[in-house]
Amino acid sequence: MYLGIDVGTSAVKALLIDENSVTLSEADVPLRVSSPKPFWSEQNPEDWWDATTRAIDELHRQNPSAIAATRAIGLSGQMHGATLLGDDDKPLRPAILWNDGRAMRECAELDATLPDLGARAGVATMSGMTAPKLIWLQKHEPDVFAKIKTILLPKDYIRFCLSGDKVTEMSDAAGTLWLDEQSRSWNESAIAACGLTPDQLPGLVEGSDITGTLHANLAARWGMADGVIIAGGGGDAATGGIGVGAVAHGDGFISLGTSSQIFVASDKYRPKPEELLHSFAHAIPNHWFQMAVLLNGASCLKWAADLLGESDITDLLNRVEAQHKAPSDILFLPYLNGERTPHNNPYARGVFFGLGSDTNREAMVQAVLEGVGFALSDAKSRLNAAGTYCDLPGVIGGGARSRYWIQMIADILGKPLARYEGATKGPAFGAARLARLALTNEPVTDVCVKPVIEEVVEPDMSRRDAYQPRFAKFQRIYAALSDEFTPN
């Protein structure tokens, strides 16, 4: 058996699969995000560990014989989070997350120091990345900065708790700005530009490498044998790709999770920082990917449902579909947490445009769904400008549960999309696959197979034509408001 653990933003998910990649048990434990100041986003690393142990405890309760047969553990997690440990290996402060926008000024400073950083790091300097957060800490929390012994990414903090090893792997390291993507090694000039030394960063491995073994006391807690190995794992984007078999050049998917991405695997390193794309090392050796990253996805739907007092999202979507009017009379900019591709603006915020006294909640929610679709269309144009295409992307993540939303996105993009079996398994499933690769050394193509396609959702081109002028207006509204999003 193989255990996958994904340290997400909204929950820790643990998932157990067998030798045939059949899911035997899964558990989710929710997490909360703290925003103590505007544009800040933080979590307590100890909350990740508590949620992880509770999730595995639940797997043990559900299926004790299967968890006892676990032979390898793979890890996935939200990327970019600055998890800072002191001399006692305890967190010095809450981790600063991927959607934190406090370090925008520090991005400009880093670019001035290292003008070629984007070409080596695979992405333009953005405030959500790990490196500028450390420059911010050096200026604003110097006492904390001076005590830093080790910097870990979220999933790697869980690795440390599981095994005592301070290690990361290429796909997660890629999101720090400290990795030289081509050579798959730490970029010492970028580390030094942040006032750090390489010995404050973890060792580097590939996602399918073995990094250590589970502590004996934890193995005993869950009834596992001694010597359970832990694999390198991957950042959540890469493990999502492993989970849906997006490893060969041109394979790709759209993720509708808390954030959203368009991911396309690549056979070589193809940096395009000028297009605000992420060109990162994949979680398996000698593979890379390009990705358009949006900071907002299915989280916009949950935000709208909570705001409107709707507890049953399935019922809400059914009502929206029943009243569907394409396109909506309302436009929604979905930038609740800022935006990366194509704007690189952590200060951008959500906007409803066109509300009237006759607007009902269903119309507002349709506009939210369309707004995410328009943002994906914006991002797709940057991939295409870089010469990157994917013939039939699948849709994964929590938003993939809605066939209605997938049809809407297909209509907006004018592109067929695949609905997969098990599309909501996500990064935890990919992490479990990496655990298997680490243990067995099987060929990647034998393990990272594509899911069964339940349906190909073809676009309605008449709706595509109707959406185009609305999409153009969506872009004009952002352009008109972009200066207004900047803090005074």
Image (cartoon, rainbow, N blue to C red):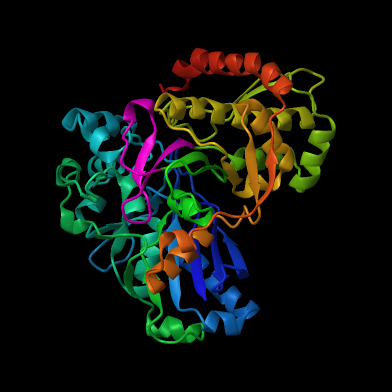
Instruction: Report how many numbered discs are placed on residues in the image.
Output: 0
The percent position of residue 485, horizontal first and vertical second, equals: 47, 22
Give the answer, above or below, for where 241 lies relative to 177. Answer: below
Q: In which quarter of the image is the C terminus?
A: top left
Magenta stretch encompasses residue 276: yes
Name the one closer to the observer, 67 or 7.
67
Q: Position of residue 129 (x, y in %)?
A: 35, 41
398 is within the stretch colored magenta = no
Residue at (45, 87) in percent of width and height: 225
In the displayed structure, 53 sits above or below 476; it is: below
Which residue: 40% across, 49% down? Answer: 79
Q: In which quarter of the image is residue 21?
A: bottom right
Q: Which residue is drawn at 82% across and 20% down?
A: 358
Residue 180 point in image, percent of width and height: 23, 45
- Residue pictured at 48% horizontal, 51% vertical: 241
The stretch in magenta equals 266-294
- Examine the image and state in which quarter residue 67 appears: bottom right
Tell me, yes or no, if residue 483 can be seen here.
yes
In the image, 410 versus 322, the foreground residue is 410
Task: Indicate left or right for 402 with 24 as reference.
Answer: right
Q: In this view, does 117 lie above or below 84?
A: above
Q: Which of 82 and 162 is in front in this view?
A: 162
In the figure, is residue 404 to the left or right of 392? Answer: right
Task: Tell me residue 233's x, y (percent).
Answer: 40, 61
Can the viewer see residue 342 in this picture? no
